[in-house]
Image (spheres, rainbow, N blue to C red):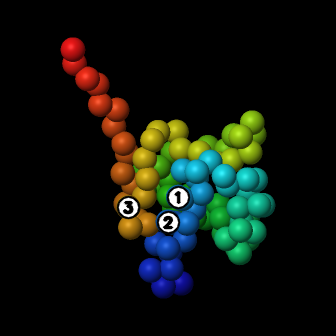
Amino acid sequence: MPQHEVHRTIALIDEQIRRKETGSPIELAGYLRMSVRMLYFYLDMMSSLGAVIHFSKELNSFHYKDDGFFKDGIRWIELQKVEVSK
């Protein structure tokens, strides 16, 4: 699979996760037109790049443990909480 397609697929998964609208693994795999096994391959790849991904049964969606996103479909950027001093 060409590298740009991998980046594009990660970007699509990232967008759905940030919206918290992935649905079940079967639903997300169907949306992406891939097998559930391939979906978990991508989620594992995203985890190895720094994202901590969990599935919530209450939300019926995957979500990130920490706020962040994938830039260019390959680099995990974690948003840091900024504290305002008084």
Residue at the farthest top position: 86
Q: Earlier in the sequence, mark 2 or mark 3?
A: 2
Amino acid at pointer 2: Ala
How far is mark 1 from mark 3, CA to CA?
A: 9 Å
How far is mark 1 from mark 2, CA to CA?
A: 5 Å
Label 2 sits on residue: 11
Measured from the top left, where is residue 77 in percent x and y?
Answer: 36, 51
Label 3 sits on residue: 71
Amino acid at pointer 1: Asp
Q: Earlier in the sequence, mark 1 or mark 3?
A: 1
The residue under the point 38% across, 67% down is 72
Q: Are marks 1 and 3 in contact (CB under 8 Å)?
A: no
Measured from the top left, where is residue 7 in percent x and y?
Answer: 46, 72
Mark 1 surroundings: few (<14), some (14-19) or many (≥20) residues within 10 A: many
The residue under the point 71% across, 75% down is 33
The residue under the point 67% across, 55% down is 22
In this rendering, is residue 21 above or below 74? above
Horizontal relation, residue 33 to residue 50: left or right: right
Label 1 sits on residue: 14
Amino acid at pointer 3: Lys
Q: Are marks 1 and 2 in contact (CB under 8 Å)?
A: yes
Horizontal relation, residue 36 to residue 15: left or right: right
